[in-house]
Amino acid sequence: MDHTLLPALTRIAEALERLAPAPPAPPSLAGADAFVWHPGPSARLAPVPRVARVEISLLQGIERQKAILAENTLRFARGLPANNVMLWGARGMGKSSLVKAAHAEANRAAPGSLALVEIHREDIRTLPDLLNILRGQERRCLVFCDDLSFEREDADYKALKSVLDGGIEGRPPNVLFYATSNRRHLMPRDMIENERSTAINPAEAVEEKVSLSDRFGLWIGFHNCDQPTYFAMVEGYARAYGIAIGAEELRRQANEWSVTRGARSGRVAWQFIQDLAGRMGVAIEG
């Protein structure tokens, strides 16, 4: 190589470096305790100034579930080993509310230690991209997907399975994944049964479908509540928000509300309290 060309080549390389755009700075997790993941060409973590949540003490009828999730979340916030969690079962029984409440409790015990990052179901295929961003963060991150399920085996299913397995790199040590679902195995039963009837090896086909849930270290089940538990939910909300009404009248109206809704659950109790507070002129948050 002609050494007289070396200075010219060096100047050209330096000029090209100046023209090339600088790599984007990693998103900051400072300034908020919760974020929403927005994938795409300009991927970003949007801070959530105020999380819509209720205090953990107001979640009634799920004492065992609260204890398990709160302990797992606090261990993680303190830098100790913890498990990915699947919260599954009856609708409206506080699965997503418990995740947000457990996050808040952990940050009270270990202030600022834990960021909650919500990823929408339709963005699950971008979960590996999100984890690549979170991998370099000093703060510990709880990635949360609400109402997770799959109607067919697709790229989304494979992406989540790979993340839970950890792949070659392994799951980032500063990240846990929490998900809620009405289904224990994330797949509809008829889809699993169809695989059983059409596959060459039915046992292996079914195992492939249900194995995704097995990759969560903790399964926490939620079940429909009875009337005493429903009344306890309603009474707890009424006390917390200062709604002045007699216990008998409160129960009568709450029961009438649940009959019109055809269900008793934490969600139904909260909707009743919203209606009652509005009729009585009491301002509440949530």
Image: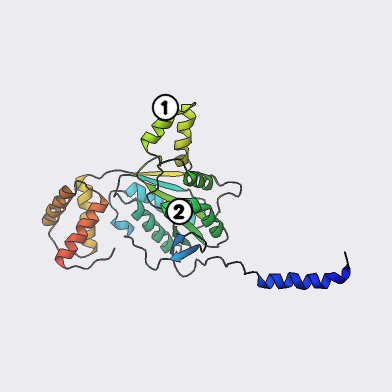
Residue name at image x 61 percent, y 66 percent: 23
Element under label 1? Answer: helix
Q: Amino acid at mark 1?
A: Ser
For disc 2, the neighbor class at 10 Å (few under 14, some 14 to 19, many from 20) is some
Disc assigned to residue 121: none
Question: Position of 155 compared to 12: left or right?
Answer: left
Element under label 2? Answer: helix
Residue name at image x 36 percent, y 58 percent: 101
> In terms of sequence position, does the residue under pointer 1 or pointer 2 come before the other?
2
Disc assigned to residue 197: 1
For disc 1, the neighbor class at 10 Å (few under 14, some 14 to 19, many from 20) is few
* Residue 61 or residue 154, whichever sits in front: 154
Q: Position of residue 164 (x, y in %)?
A: 51, 46
- Tag 2 residue: 123
Q: Position of residue 270 (x, y in %)?
A: 24, 56
Task: Say if 126 sits above or below 34 in the image.
Answer: above
